[in-house]
Amino acid sequence: MQHRTKPVRTLLVAARQSQLTVRRRRGVLRRSAGEWPCGGVGRRVHNLVVTVNCAMPARLPILVRQYHGQRQEPVPYITSSWEAALAGSPEEVSVLLDDRWSERAQTPDRRRVTRDHLKELLGTTHLHDPLQVRRALVMVMAWGSGTSNTRSLRNTPAALAASDCARQLRMAAERCRDGDLVHAYAKFSLPGIGRSFFTKWFAFAGLQPGRSWQPLILDDRVLATLNNSLGISLKLLAKDRRWSRRYASYVRCMHAWSAELNQMDLDCPAERLEWIMFHHKGRPVNRP
């Protein structure tokens, strides 16, 4: 006995914005994988059809409304702590004092960095220049750590000491820019850099100007909000045990949810949606 695939809501807005080829077969929404973050062969994605099942969680609009008017503040970091931790990498750590990529804080020995700083830095980073790539990693790690996560002061030197550090970072960035998030995730390996931080690298180094979607951060706080606050299982969403597939499905659905929220007069780009989930940290969603 054959079982038919359950119907999935068609996200027309997301399709129009992404200029995707959308076709229905047995009630399942399908998209050309060349336009979505998914797996491919080599540097291109060839004729891979991906089933999209991105029904928006009922509590998501409520959560987004709770954060109306709030925004992410610049992230502070302690320069002396990073200089001590990266004493063996003076050229790399110097990026933390560069006024182009961060700003002075009121407190001595501290500076602040924003998402826009990181986008500008990675936008000018030549991926085939190992020193530039390594410097960019240090800046991303400082932004992702702030002043509370001291583990990064140990993990970053370990990553920089890896013989293939720059190559790993370059390959991940190129795969993300090519739209191959599955292989970017599956192939990435640097000591001390787990999912919470290497997806930060994906989000900034993998930006592709003019593309309708971009990689997003998937850290433990975002995951807690998906699981605990919204009742979303990435394993069920992706219908796959592999984290590389779960990550690609997460990015795809976040952009689809953003498009659907926009139709509800809730302007919430996927990047902001990610920040809301990070800030919420898995707490319950309060009904209005």
Image (cartoon, rainbow, N blue to C red):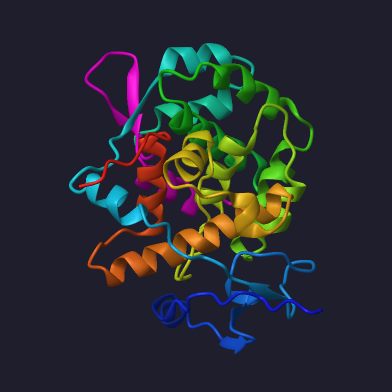
* x, y percent for residue 180: 67, 62
Q: Does 273 appear in magenta?
A: no
| Magenta region | 100-128
Is 120 placed left or right of 131 in the picture? left
* x, y percent for residue 264: 26, 68
Is 265 placed left or right of 101 in the picture? left
Residue for point 23% across, 51% down: 65
Question: Between 211 and 132, which is closer to the camera in this rendering?
Answer: 211
Residue 96 found in image quarter = top left
Q: Residue furthest right?
A: 1
The answer to whether residue 248 is visible is: no
Residue for point 40% across, 27% down: 97
Residue for point 45% across, 67% down: 256
Up/down of 84 relative to 286, above or below: above
What is the number of callouts on the image? 0
The answer to whether residue 256 is visible is: yes
* x, y percent for residue 201: 56, 44
Is 238 placed left or right of 283 in the picture? right
